[in-house]
Amino acid sequence: MKKEAVLLDMDGVLVDSEGYTQKMIADFFREKTNYDPDSLYLSRFIGSSGEEATWKRVFESIEDQPDFIQLNQKLLNYLNGKSIPYADIKMKHAEQLLVFLKEKGYQVGLASSSKRNKIEKMLSQTGFARYFDAVLSGELVAESKPNPEIYNRLAELLNVSKDRCLVIEDSFYGIRASINAGMKTLALRDDRFGMDQHEADAMINDLLEAIPYLE
């Protein structure tokens, strides 16, 4: 079925902020806690906001579990003190894909678990803002990925039926969210973090490889 809208995740799809953020998270654990970052599954943060459930998944194999709420706030404060150079970490062919989509008349939406201010910084610094018809951030939905709410709401905002949407994701939580929403889902391959991407309908190695799936 021909698609009418493309919905994209931000981190790991439009910009390589996941690699940058993973380094900062590892630095946080090394500098600010008694936990060894190499012993934690830090990739479990990818694609999900930092609520308590995420922390429990990260620390599930550690007997002496910390105060998740307190630790999460410390991490957020640490990360908020860092600046991500979005213009320097644009994913390969991200802008070329966005230009193609707008020239061909597709609706384009952004669904990210990140905070709105971070999304706006990314859109401003990269110049991507002009390509998007709708943007949803993590704080605008009641349930974060892997819950499908963010994709369901984005389709509603664009006034496009879910079977006419194509999603490009990279994380396990993001892929599951879009699959649970009943949308065709492509996974942009990333072998660096050991992410489980097998639930996606198809794998792509480059963003431009998504184009044939629009038909």
Image: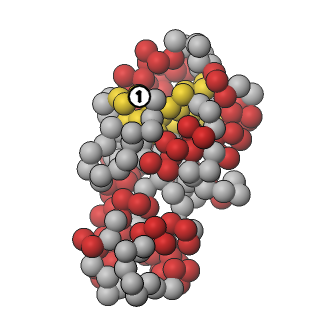
Q: Amino acid at mark 1?
A: Ala
Please, is residue 68 above or below residue 19 in the view? below
The answer to whether residue 159 is left or right of residue 75 is right
Tell me what residue is drawn at x 50 percent, y 66 percent: 54
Tell me residue 16's x, y (percent): 35, 47
Q: Is residue 87 visible?
A: no
Q: Which residue shows up at 51% across the image and 57% down it?
A: 48
Percent position (x, y) of residue 85? 37, 54
Residue closest to the eye, 34 or 73: 34
Task: Please tell me which residue lies in front, 198 or 13.
Answer: 198
Q: Which residue is mark 1?
A: 202
What colouring method underlies this structural image? secondary structure
At horizontal 44% and vertical 48% (from top left) the residue drawn is 172
Using a 10 Å C-alpha cutoff, classify the residue at mark 1 as few (fewer than 14 neighbours), some (14 to 19) or many (20 or more).
Answer: some
Relative image position of residue 63 (x, y in whole percent):
39, 84
The N terminus sits in image quarter: top right
